[in-house]
């Protein structure tokens, strides 16, 4: 019986050694095929190596890389996850899982794996951008600032930090990061548009006109909303003819929206363009003779032009037509302000 037991044990050992040899053989073949860029053949070889040795960590890892080359990201995740299960401290697998889950927009998982690999390249970037997408803006800000201190030329992280400040409503903090992001990638028309709107809201109308114009030149769709923003920026910047042309063109496509004409009259009044403002007041009155607000606006324009008596009479008549306008006289405001 003792002899039989020794024989069985020897046979088991021989089988184990044979499996190990086979696993190493197919692993080596997989590396050769991978280096030759025959990725499908390489992957099959790695799978055979794993079949002979289910705990062959390096084979799972290389198969994961090979699947990435073939853009088989689901298969790559399976292989890298197996490596992580076998070796929870394997930073190579953790980093790949971090990146893959981020690209899959699974931000919780991406942050989880980033936390397990704090020394991996790009960890703070992934954490910051994931937290931004989860709307945890203060933590995102902290991580993104750290990421940019490590790599100041990271365009996406720079833009994401700009958006973080924008969504935190810290507009002035957002501006320099938007400007840097746009300077690093001049193809991003959306970024230019957002910076243009940011300039507009901060009353930097010259910057708004320049950046919105650049956005259009870079391919941003010039729909009605875009043209309206650009048109008002032009009016505030003193580009009256171009601004009026854009805005009046919108009104012609939306003839029922009289507020565009009213807003144009107000902006031009603020810019001391009284004759231009009067033209839009007249347009409003032509459309609706009983438009008391337009009449009041017209009266203010005549007063600013020096014809105070006529202007006052028009304002008085407007208040008679709409008594609510009396409060505007006390506060010295335009009707829509």
Image (tube, grey):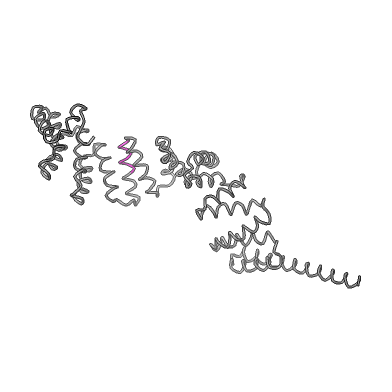
Asked if residue 146 is positioned above or below residue 20 in the image, the reply reads above
User: Which of the 4 image quadrants contains residue 52?
Assistant: bottom right
The total of numbered circles placed on residues is 0
Residue 185 falls left or right of residue 202: right
Principal secondary structure, stretch drawn in magenta: helix
For residue 242, which quarter of the picture?
A: top left
On the image, the x and y values in percent for residue 270 come to 22, 33
Residue pictured at 32% horizontal, 52% vertical: 221
Which sits in the foreground, 109 or 73? 109
Extent of the magenta region: 204-211
Residue at 12 percent across and 31 percent down: it is: 315
Q: Position of residue 49 (x, y in %)?
A: 68, 66
Q: Is residue 30 magenta?
A: no
**Residue 56 quadrant:** bottom right
Q: Quadrant of the N terminus?
A: bottom right
Q: In the figure, is residue 166 to the left or right of 236?
A: right
Q: On the rendered image, what quadrant is the C terminus found in? A: top left
Is 149 left, or right, of 266 in this rendering?
right
Which residue lies most toward the front here?
Answer: 323
- Locate residue 287, reporting x and y percent: 12, 45
Q: Name above or below for residue 333 compared with residue 135.
A: above
Q: Is residue 21 above or below residue 282?
A: below
Q: Position of residue 176 (x, y in %)?
A: 42, 37
> What residue is rendered at 45% in x and 41% in y?
164
Q: Does the magenta run of residues contain 206?
A: yes
- In the picture shown, does residue 174 fall above or below 12? above
């Amino acid at each position: 019986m003792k002899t039989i037991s020794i024989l069985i044990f020897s046979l088991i050992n021989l089988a184990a050694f044979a499996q190990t040899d086979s696993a190493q053989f197919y692993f080596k073949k997989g590396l050769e095929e991978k280096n030759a860029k025959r990725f499908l053949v390489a992957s099959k070889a790695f799978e055979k190596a794993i079949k002979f040795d289910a705990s062959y960590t390096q084979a799972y890892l290389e198969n994961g890389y090979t699947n990435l080359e073939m853009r088989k990201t689901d298969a790559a995740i399976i292989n890298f996850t197996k490596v992580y299960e076998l070796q929870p401290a394997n930073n190579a697998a953790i980093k790949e899982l971090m990146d893959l889950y981020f690209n899959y927009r699974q931000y919780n998982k991406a942050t989880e794996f980033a936390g397990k690999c704090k020394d991996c390249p790009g960890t703070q970037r992934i954490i910051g951008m994931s937290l931004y997408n989860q709307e945890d803006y203060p933590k995102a800000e902290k991580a993104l600032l750290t990421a940019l201190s490590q790599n100041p030329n990271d365009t996406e992280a720079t833009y994401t930090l700009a958006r973080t400040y924008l969504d935190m409503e810290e507009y002035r903090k957002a501006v320099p990061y938007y400007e840097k992001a746009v300077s690093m990638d001049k193809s991003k028309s959306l970024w230019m548009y957002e910076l243009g709107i940011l300039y507009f809201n901060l009353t930097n109308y010259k910057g708004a006109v320049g950046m919105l114009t650049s956005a259009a030149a870079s391919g941003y769709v010039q729909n009605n909303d875009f043209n309206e923003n650009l048109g008002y920026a032009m009016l505030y910047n003193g580009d009256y003819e171009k601004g009026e042309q854009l805005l009046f063109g919108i009104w012609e496509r939306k003839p029922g929206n009289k507020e565009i004409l009213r807003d144009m009259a107000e902006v031009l009044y603020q810019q001391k363009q009284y004759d231009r403002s009067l033209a839009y007041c007249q347009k409003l009155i032509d459309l609706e003779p009983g438009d008391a607000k337009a009449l009041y606006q017209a009266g203010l324009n005549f007063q600013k032009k020096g014809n105070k008596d006529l202007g006052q009479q028009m304002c008085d008549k407007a208040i008679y037509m709409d008594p609510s306008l009396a409060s505007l006289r006390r506060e010295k405001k335009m009707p829509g302000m």
